[in-house]
Each structure stands twice: as structure tokens, then as C-alpha cells.
Image: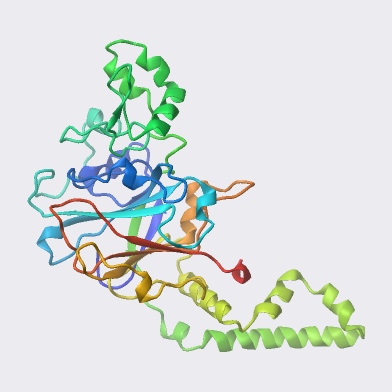
Amino acid sequence: MAAGVELGFAGAAAPGEAWRLRSAHFPSKVGGRPAWLGEAGLPGPAALRCGRCAQPCALLLQLYAPLPGRADAFHRSLFVFACRGAACYRPPGPRGPLRVFRNQLPRRNDTYPEEPPPREPPPASAAAAPPRRLRSGAALCRVCGCLGPRACGRCRRAAYCGPEHQALDWRRGHRRACAQPGAAGDLEDAVPDHNEFLFPEYEILIEPEEPESPADSSVDPDDEEGAVDTSENSDKQEELRATGSANEALECLDEETLEAMAKHETEDDKIFQKFKERIAAEPEQIIRYCRGGEGPIWVSGENIPEEKDIPNCSCGAKRIFEFQIMPQLLNHLKVDSLGESIDWGTLAVYTCANNCNEGNQYTEEFIWKQDFSAGSM
């Protein structure tokens, strides 16, 4: 990643280009199955369960973020997993329904060639479906793509992370495939690339954030907003005098005006206003990346973590802010429902300041969830 703030946008993979989101091409992506970087020390099923309901978490996104000048982090990816249960997102704060892991490799490693991956698509047979096993031989769950230490008791060929996904795959058709002896090829084809457990898959496209122009920064947003509101309030006062009745006029005010008058000048609104202004130029951004530099832009004055709230890494080093996941990502996840839905204001990811490397294992990092305040909704 480059210096300064970089923005990520969700882009639909073109038909026939799913191969770009496989491990060999070091993707940044939303949803689907994980495109694991290293093959050693993957997080096991227990590490990928929700901290509230204990159900398996799905890959929310992964971000390819190598560190220049660090030979041991020539390849480096961050993986964020999220619970599919909406009720688990009610409390704000750390972890809960979310998990984040970091993995890195040197340029010379046992998994990938030193040369950059080819830009041309691989043979059709290699690009047809996500892998069911790592090259090391470790089995992956047929539903979520995480480690699958549990095997189907009948055919012994299908792997799962736990009983929940074994039951889901059984309902989705493994019942029929499993009954066909020796049909290993058909068995693998029985599960599609996507299923109802996985989040929709998109490529994350990275672009640098354009700096604010002098014209944008020369005006105090609060002063400008105050001037607009003063003008609007003057108009409303004229309406009150014209009607001769304040109560009658207030009944005529639209809901938006009443809300603006009621909550103007609160500290929380100033923070939310700054958030909106900062993303106004690129409202579709789903990622803001700036490791060790500019911190998150918060959506509220409530539930902002203090330094003591961010635990040190297991190596003892402090953690620093690396990137945040924006609420715009929710628009791509298809999680809206008539009842309760998965929701957040922003998700801030903090990683080891020393970028420790424990034998190329997957290291758990820290994620903080902030919600919108009631006044900003």
C-alpha cells in the first residue's frame, strides 16, 4: 500500500474472471470463500466462531497490504470474518461478531513463485472452481472455505468446519451426491461457488484519496452550516409572523427542518457532519486504508476507543490503526431485512505496530465496531 489514505471500492468481477480472486493473484476482495495467503497456521474453526452466538463466521473481506521495506512481509493480507446473525451486532465495541487475522510471507516462500502472477487467465480446469484442498493437502470446508477437519461419515470425502455447515451442505444436495459411490468429480461439482452462508463476492479496487482543494478547506463547515441554518430560520420566522401563530407554523414545518433545528450544534452532529464531508467526494468508498498514519474518521462522538481499549499484540507491541470498513459496504452485502439487519457505523482494524511474524502463522488482530448515534440516523 502507498503512503497517504487509500480508498477501496467494490467492483463486480467480470464474467469469466473469478480466477482474479484466487490466492495465486493476491486479491483484495469482499465475500466469497477466503483466498488464503499462507498455508501454514490457518485459524481453526473455533477461532472463526462468533464471540456472542458461537456460530461460524463468514469471510467479510480480505485486503492485500504488503509492507514496503519489510522482506518478511513482501506478501501480506488481512482477513476479516463476520457473523451472519443480525442480533449479534447490537452491542458496540470490540470483537463480538467480528474477527480479523493477519498473514504474511517473504518473496521467496514455499507456496508462490517469486515472479508476479500472470495477467492472463489460467486454463479452464484451474479456474473453474475454488479449491477444496490447500496445496499442502489440508481439507477446506465445502461451504465456507475455512479449514475442514470434519469429514462426512458416509463418503469420507466431503470436509466441513463443523456440524452446522455439514447440515447445510446435506440439505443443499450432498445427500444425493454422497449416495453415488466413487463419484468424486461429481461430488465436488455439487456445491456451487456461492451459497446462502457466504457474503456476495466483489473485487476491491484501490485508489488514492484525492487531497482537499484549498477552496474546500478555506470555509469552516460549521460556520457555513450555521449561515445556511440562519437563513432558513429567518425564512421560517417570516412564515410565523405571516400566519400569526407559531404553533400553526411549526405544524407546517417538514420533518427534515425540525430535525435539523433540534440537533444542530451538538458535538455528535459535528463529528457526523465531518464524516459526511470527508467522504462526500467519494461516497461509494467501502475501505479507508492508512496504516500508522491518519486515524479513523468516526461517525459519532460515542464509543470512540481510547488507547487503553486497544490491547497490545500477543508479541507485546502496541497495535496501531491500519484501515476502516465503511458503512457503504452494507449496501453490497444484501443483508437488509424487514426485521433486524447486520449493521455498523464503521469498523476500525488495529494491527501490530511491529508487524510481528511468528513463523508465517495467522495472527489475530483487533477490530472495533462503532455504531451511528441515535441522532445521526
Can residue 295 be seen?
A: no
Report which quarter residue 326 is drawn in: bottom left
Frontmost residue, 249 versus 358: 358
Q: Residue at x 45, y 85 (%)?
A: 217
Rendered view: 52 above or below 176: below
In the image as oriented, which residue stretches furthest toward the top?
181
**Residue at image point 34% right, 11% down:** 180
Q: Nearer the viewer, residue 284 or 320?
A: 320
Residue ID at (20%, 34%)? 138
Please identify the residue farthest to the left as the structure is shown. Answer: 108
Using the image, determine if residue 33 lies above or below residue 293. above
Residue 196 lies left or right of residue 223; in this view the side is left
Residue 225 in which image quadrant: bottom right
The quadrant in which the N terminus is found is bottom left
How far across and down, in percent of the image, does residue 74 sit?
14, 58
Residue 147, image quadrant: top left
